[in-house]
Image: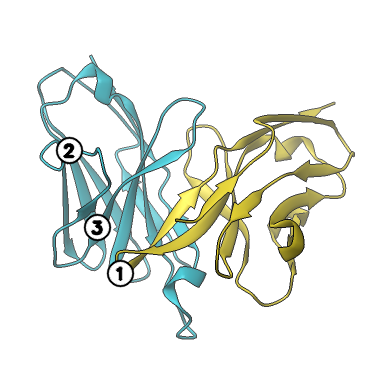
Amino acid sequence: AQSVTQLGSHVSVSEGALVLLRCNYSSSVPPYLFWYVQYPNQGLQLLLKYTSAATLVKGINGFEAEFKKSETSFHLTKPSAHMSDAAEYFCAVSDYEQGTYKYIFGTGTRLKVLA
Amino acid sequence: GAVVSQHPSRVICKSGTSVKIECRSLDFQATTMFWYRQFPKQSLMLMATSNEGSKATYEQGVEKDKFLINHASLTLSTLTVTSAHPEDSSFYICSARAPSLTGAVKGRTALHFGNGTRLTVT
């Protein structure tokens, strides 16, 4: 089964600083990877997804992620953090199992933005 | 597009009662919906995959008689927590796979989530 690992359950950055949230995947076949954001007491919102097209994927709110096969990584970045970026971020992979695609989520990284 | 509506957003019930949570795809048809449970400050745990017109597929360790799932139409799936107990208190989130306009493999399409239901059992 495929899986994703998010290093760092908490990340703090200053407003205006670079945001880097790490995600590594485990897959024997080309994966489909996603980044989602969750604000308190809400569902998840899709930021971006990788589906084997361009390795650098641009998403909403200025976020982007680069798929690196050699490193089995799909790290999420944003050049300049904004206070509104404070939230929980989840990396996910879709896994084909028992005739259907399931979506497996990482443990999440809580981003804190310091003024 | 691809809006998923989940109700109620918050519910408090007494131990022993049952609670129904609805998940609707508002502007698309969802043959498959997923139900997740999220514990405080933790990730999402897939509970079951809901398939329109057929029985749900439950993940290992999830009691199907405890968490009843019905997907009677292409736009509605319900999760009923039966005989709820305090340990069932959690944040429940439904999701549906966005429709593929290009015929892409289903695994390539992202999920769209409801806003979740905070269940508190007293």
Quarter of the image that includes the N terminus of chain A:
bottom left
Q: Residue at x 30, y 57 (%)?
A: B24
User: With A103 as the anchor, is A62 left or right in this view?
Assistant: right
Give the chain letter at badge 2.
B
In contact (CB < 8 Å): disc 1 and disc 3: no
Quarter residue A11 falls in: top right
- Marks 1, 2: nearer the viewer: 1
Please provide percent x and percent y for residue B58.
Answer: 23, 49
Specify whether disc 1 shares its chain with disc 2: no
Q: Residue at x 38, y 68 (%)?
A: B27
Q: Disc 3 to disc 2, how far (Cα)? A: 14 Å
- Marks 3, 2: nearer the viewer: 2
Give the chain letter at badge 3.
B
Label ID, residue B63: 2
Looking at the colours in the rendered structure, which chain would you say is drawn in yellow?
Answer: A
User: With B17 as the anchor, is A48 left or right in this view?
Assistant: right
Q: Residue at x 77, y 35 (%)?
A: A83
- SS for callout 1: loop
User: With B2 as the anchor, is B69 left or right in this view?
Assistant: left
Give the chain letter at badge 1.
A
Label ID, residue A99: 1
Q: Nearer the viewer, residue B10 or A111?
A: A111
- SS for callout 2: loop
Please provide percent x and percent y for residue A53.
Answer: 67, 77
User: With B109 as the anchor, is A54 left or right in this view?
Assistant: right
Q: Residue at x 72, y 45 (%)?
A: A22
The picture's colour for chain B is cyan
- SS for callout 3: strand
Q: Amino acid at mark 2?
A: Glu
Outermost residue, top direction?
A: B122
Label ID, residue B50: 3
